Amino acid sequence: MEVLGIDIGGSGIKGAPVDTASGRLTEERLRIPTPQPAKPRGVAEVVVEIVKHFDWTGPVGVTFPGVVVDGVIMTAANVDHSWIGVDAKKLFDGATVLNDADAAGVAEMRFGEGRDRMGTVIMLTFGTGIGSAVFVDGVLVPNTELGHLQIHGKDAESRASDHAREEHDLGWEKWAGRVEEYLRHVEMLFSPSLFLIGGGVSKKADKFLPYVHVDTAVVPARLRNDAGIIGAALAVK
Ligand code: BGC
């Protein structure tokens, strides 16, 4: 099946048709800057533009950086708060809508490092925030929001996201210390068999993972920028 996958991020909205059997993009992806502020109507216009660009009439899957239950947006930590309560499935004309980290995790479990991994596998995406996707024997437990665990009385993502690294001008080793502390906390709660590290910073894993010491195996995600697009497409039933 071919599905149009669209990944809504804080800075860009990316889309491409995906062959769901192979996980490959069948056309070059299109990226359009996210309108600022990223309110529902402006974002919906960009989604329509992407659909038109590909002359798409088939099924569409869309990611969103917040909790999504039955197509309805429940939280919006890093995007405009007017999203809360919006029926995104309706707004996007019946598309399947899911959390961005869940989508990236679904793609990584099917076509990347998570393939055939049983037990509890936790994908964490480090970007503007920290996203999470928890899998038990390959089955997703959606909307886990582990980026908002409290560490030293603060939201974990405000200390350990890639954005926090840049904002506080932290060196790799210093930031890695925060990531380690965070992973130890998640490890204590879930005793996972594997951590998958995603988000844009995962391509620089060699700069920080050597400083991250936890008991669980930690592996950078294999599908880089396109994980969200592919996962959005795979989510369409
Ligand atoms: C949001 C999550 C999202 C993550 C990554 C967090 O702030 O609460 O829903 O997956 O950022 O975008």
Image (cartoon, helix red, strand yellow):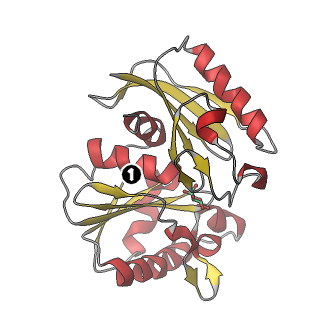
Estimate the x, y position of residue 1 in percent, counting from the top left: 32, 22
Which of the two residues, 6 or 217, is positioned nearer the viewer here?
6
Q: What is the x, y in percent for residue 133?
A: 41, 59
For residue 48, what is the image quadrant?
top right
Foreground: 85 or 175?
85
Quadrant holding the C terminus: top left
Mark 1 surroundings: few (<14), some (14-19) or many (≥20) residues within 10 A: many
Residue 213 versus residue 145 in the image, above or below: below
- Horizontal relation, residue 153 to residue 43: left or right: left
- Total number of numbered discs in the rendering: 1
> Is 43 placed left or right of 118 in the picture?
right
User: Is ligand 1 within 8 Å of the beta carbon of the residue shown at mark 1?
Assistant: no
Q: Residue at x 78, y 51 (%)?
A: 82
In the picture, measured across the screen, residue 170 lies left or right of residue 57, that is right
Residue at the spot of label 1: 105
Q: Which of these two is toward me, 97 or 33? A: 97
| Residue 17 to residue 213: above or below | above
Against 166, is 88 above or below? above
Q: Foreground residue, 132 or 125? A: 132
What residue lies at 58% left-to-right and 66% top-to-bottom?
Answer: 161
Identified by mark 1, the residue type is Gly
The answer to whether any part of residue 112 appears in the image is no
- Residue that protrudes farthest toward the top in the picture: 55
Q: Compared to 228, does 195 lie above or below?
A: below
**Residue farthest bottom in this picture:** 152
User: Farthest residue in the right direction?
Assistant: 37
Residue 190 appears in the picture as rendered: yes
Residue lying at 46% horizontally and 18% vertically, measured from the top left: 58
In the rendering, at what x and y percent does residue 88 appear?
A: 63, 40
Quadrant containing ligand 1 reads bottom right
Say what secondary structure mark 1 lies in.
helix
Q: Residue at x 46, y 38 (%)?
A: 232
